[in-house]
Image: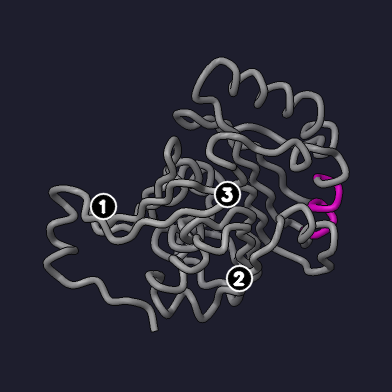
Amino acid sequence: MPKQINKITHLLSYFYNQPLATASSTYNPILELSLSRGRLLLNTDNATYSYGDLYDTFYRPFKQLKFKEKNLQNVLVLGWGLGSIPIMLQKKFNQVATQYDAVEIDAEVIKLNKTYLPASLLSKSHFYCQDAYEFIMESTNKYDLICIDIFLDTVTPNKFRSQPFLEKAKQLLNPKGYLLYNTLTLDATLKKASEAFYKDTFSPTFPSAFIVKTPGNNMLIYQQK
C-alpha cells in the first residue's frame, strides 16, 4: 500500500518544503522527493522531474488544446517521473483514462512512485522499467495521448530525437491522438538545440506540428489525422 503522508506534514508543506525521501541511481545520482504546497516534488541536481498538477510545462499546452473537452482513454508517458502528467490530467482536466503506460528507466524512481502515489492512480498505471526507445520500437499499442518528457538531468539522448523513433511513435497514435514532446530552452545552447530539432527532424516527420512556449521549454505538439 502507498505510504500515507500525515496531516501535519501536508499542512507544513504550504510554508516550506517537507523532505520525504532521497535516493541515488546510475541514471540520477541525486533524487530528492519532498512535499511542496501539498504536491509531490521530485528534483534531481539540476532539474525538476515532477511537481504534481503544478507542472506548468504541460499544463499550458493541455489548456491550449482544451483537454477538458477530450476523452483520453489510453495514455503513454515516456519519462514518467512521479506521475505529474496523469495527476494533472485527472485534477485539472477531468480526465478519467482507463490506462496509463508509464515508461521510466530508473528503478529508483519507480520505487518512489509505488511508495507515494495514491492507490487510485497506481491501479491504472502499468510501469515499464525500460529504455523508452526500446519500448517505442517494440510496442504495438495504440494511444490517445503520447507525452515525451525524457531527460537525463537536462540532456535528451540523441536517439530520442531521431527520425526512426519519431516515425514509430507516430504509428502508435490513434486517429485524432496527440503527441507532445518536451524540449528545454533554459539557456542559449539548449534553445538552439530545441529549435534545430524542431526544424530539421520533428516538423518534417509531423508536418502539421506546432510549438507552445513555456518558461524554459518549447513543447512540440502534433495531432494525428
The quarter holding residue 118 reads: bottom left
Residue matched to label 2: 127
Instruction: Identify the disc placed on residue 27.
Output: 3
| Residue type pointed to by label 1 | Ser
Tell me, for residue 119, which label it has, or none. none
26 within the magenta span: no
Q: Residue 36's mark?
A: 1
Q: Amino acid at mark 2?
A: Phe
User: Is 19 positioned to the left or the right of 122 in the image?
Assistant: left
**Amino acid type, callout 3:** Tyr
Please give the name of the residue rendered at 46% of the width and 54% of the height, measured from the top-left corner: 24
Main SS of the magenta part reads: helix
Q: CA distance from mark 3 to mark 2?
A: 17 Å
Residues packed near mark 1 inside 10 Å, few (<14), some (14 to 19) or many (20 plus) = many
- Residue at x-position 44% and y-position 51%: 50
| The one of 52 and 93 positioned closer to us in this rendering | 52
Secondary element at image label 3: loop
Q: Of callouts 3 and 2, which one flags the residue occurring earlier in the amino acid sequence? A: 3
- Residue bounds of the magenta highlight: 166-173
